[in-house]
Amino acid sequence: MQPSNSFPRTNLRTNFTIMRLVKTDLRGLNSVGVLSKAGMVLHGMTDNPNFPSPMPTLAQLEDGMQELQVAITNATGGGRLAHALKDTATTKLSNLLKIMGAYVSAVAEGDETIVLGAGFELRHRSTRIGTLERPTGVRASTFSKPGQIALKWKPVRGARVYEVYTLVSGSETEEENWGLIAVSSSSRCMIEGLESCRYHCFRVCGVGAAGKGPFSQLARAIAG
């Protein structure tokens, strides 16, 4: 069976050596600071023609902000549970911002004005870590819900985020046949919106300060 071709081709280049442009380190920011940062990014990316298909979506970013705002309010004078929920909401929004930063880096292709226009800060130049290793142990599993496949792999040392590509159409040996479908800050992700009862093919690579590492071996599964 041929993999589904229901995904649009991505216009993002595959040589993301500009990962270090975007500052995604939020250490030192409290919950209010993270919320404020997310607000700047939301403002910068709303109706911004440079970012037609943000990952995550702006709606997801807004939902994360709303969740954190409510958690901050409830934690004021609240007990231990309320503060724990605030910490959870802060971590969730921070992760959304990190993934968004990876997307902005890919689109900006080294253009600092595009990064600043998205509401992000520029990172200080850092020493290259070196070429990343290829992700290993990549597994694709059919999930119980329709149109979903769960992916996981072993973490890659030095990788800040991982890019997941799907085979859009044609031969897997042709680079133009692959499209970026997800960016994950951890070594696992859930792919949604797939055509059910069809095989789908994926590959993963890590992205770090020195750029993009090699692709993993292919993983295939049938969407639920």
Image (cartoon, rainbow, N blue to C red):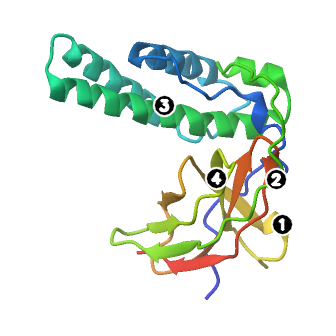
At 33% from the left edge and 28% from the top edge, which residue is drawn? 87
Give the class, few, some or many, for how many residues have Cα within 10 Å of label 2's Cα (few <14, many ≥20). Answer: some
130 versus 59 height, above or below:
below
In terms of secondary structure, where does tag 1 sit?
helix
Mark 4 to mark 3: distance in Å? 16 Å
Q: CA distance from mark 3 to mark 1?
A: 32 Å
The answer to whether residue 57 is seen in the rendering is: yes
For label 3, the SS is helix
The reply to whether discs 2 and 4 touch (Cβ–Cβ < 8 Å) is no
Q: Which mark is residue 137?
A: none
Q: Mark 3 touching mark 2, by CB under 8 A?
A: no
In the image, residue 157 above or below residue 178: above
Q: Quadrant of residue 17?
A: top right
Query: Which residue: 75% across, 41% down?
Result: 106
Local secondary structure at mark 4:
strand
Front residue of 135/113: it is 135
In the rendering, at what x and y percent does residue 36 appear? 48, 13
Foreground: disc 2 or disc 4: 4
Q: Write down the residue under mark 1.
A: 175
Q: Which mark is residue 162?
A: 4
Q: For mark 3, what is the residue?
A: 94
Of label 3 and label 2, which has the lower sequence position? 2
Numbered badge on residue 14: 2
Q: Amino acid at mark 3?
A: Ser
Query: Which label's residue is closer to the chain start, 3 or 1?
Result: 3
On the image, the x and y values in percent for residue 159 come to 67, 49
- Residue 59 in sight here: no
Binning the other alpha carbons within 10 Å of mark 3 as few (below 14), some (14 to 19) or many (20 upward) gives: many
Three-letter amino acid code of the residue under disc 2: Thr
Badge 4 amino acid: Tyr
What residue appears at the point 15 percent right and 17 percent down from the top-left corner?
78
In the image, 5 versus 165, the foreground residue is 165
